[in-house]
Image (cartoon, rainbow, N blue to C red):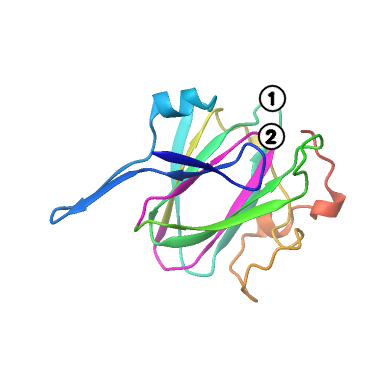
Amino acid sequence: MDLIPTTLDGCFQVRPFFAEDERGKFVKTFHAERFAALGLPTDWREEYYSSSRKGVIRGMHFQTPPYDHEKLVYCLQGKVLDVVVDLRKKSPTFGQYFATELDATYGHGLMIPKGMAHGFLALTDDVLMAYKVTTVYAAQNDKGIRWDSLGFDWGVTDPIISARDRDHPAFADFVSPF
């Protein structure tokens, strides 16, 4: 397993152990000793997945303190354009974003630290995204910023977006608690 630093401080691309033969694929998405050696979390509190169809944007989501969390995401099926933005006021990469394609074909993922918002665009039908997080979901701390307020070109003109995600504040209006 390789953990490759991104342009955002503390955010890593995860390149898991991957094997394929006539039976299919085997992907190891998490390795406690490797994560611990890099000072990354190994104590997950919840794990869940979402399904989306092509053209769906989910995001940009995060939880505020004291329920903020590290998040490990990866694509189980299909392909997404995954986007992370740094919301940490004292970070050298504050306000910057990182985008990458996550493709189930390769099992790649992202390790996202506390204080970053996460979202994705489903590039194929029948996308399954998996998430591991270090805190339990807390509705009162579940927040977001508007997906189209980052200066990032998602490459779509009419995405499918929930009412909740459309109503998040713009990044310029967001007061970061991080």
Is residue 42 visible in the rendered image? The answer is: no
User: Is 3 drawn above or below residue 51 in the view shown?
Assistant: above
Q: Nearer the viewer, mark 2 or mark 1?
A: 1
* Tag 2–tag 1 contact (CB < 8 Å): yes
- Disc 1 on helix, strand or loop? loop
Query: Where residue 138 is drawn, which disc sits there?
Result: none
Residue 163 is a magenta residue? no
- Disc 2 on helix, strand or loop? helix
Q: Mark 2 points at which residue?
A: 141
Residue at left offset 69%, top offset 34%: 140
Q: Position of residue 126 (x, y in %)?
A: 39, 63
Check disc 1: other Cα within 10 Å, few if <14, some if 14-19, many if 20+.
Answer: few
User: Is 22 situated left or right of 65 in this image?
Assistant: left
Residue at left offset 38%, top offset 30%: 31
Q: Name the residue under label 1.
A: 66
User: Is 92 situated left or right of 119 in this image?
Assistant: right
Residue 120 is a magenta residue? yes
Type of amino acid at the residue the image marks with label 1: Pro
Quadrant, the N terminus: top left
Type of amino acid at the residue the image marks with label 2: Asn
Q: Earlier in the sequence, mark 2 or mark 1?
A: 1
* Span highlighted in magenta in the image: 106-127
Q: Where is residue 41 in the image (x, y as percent from the top left)?
A: 52, 26
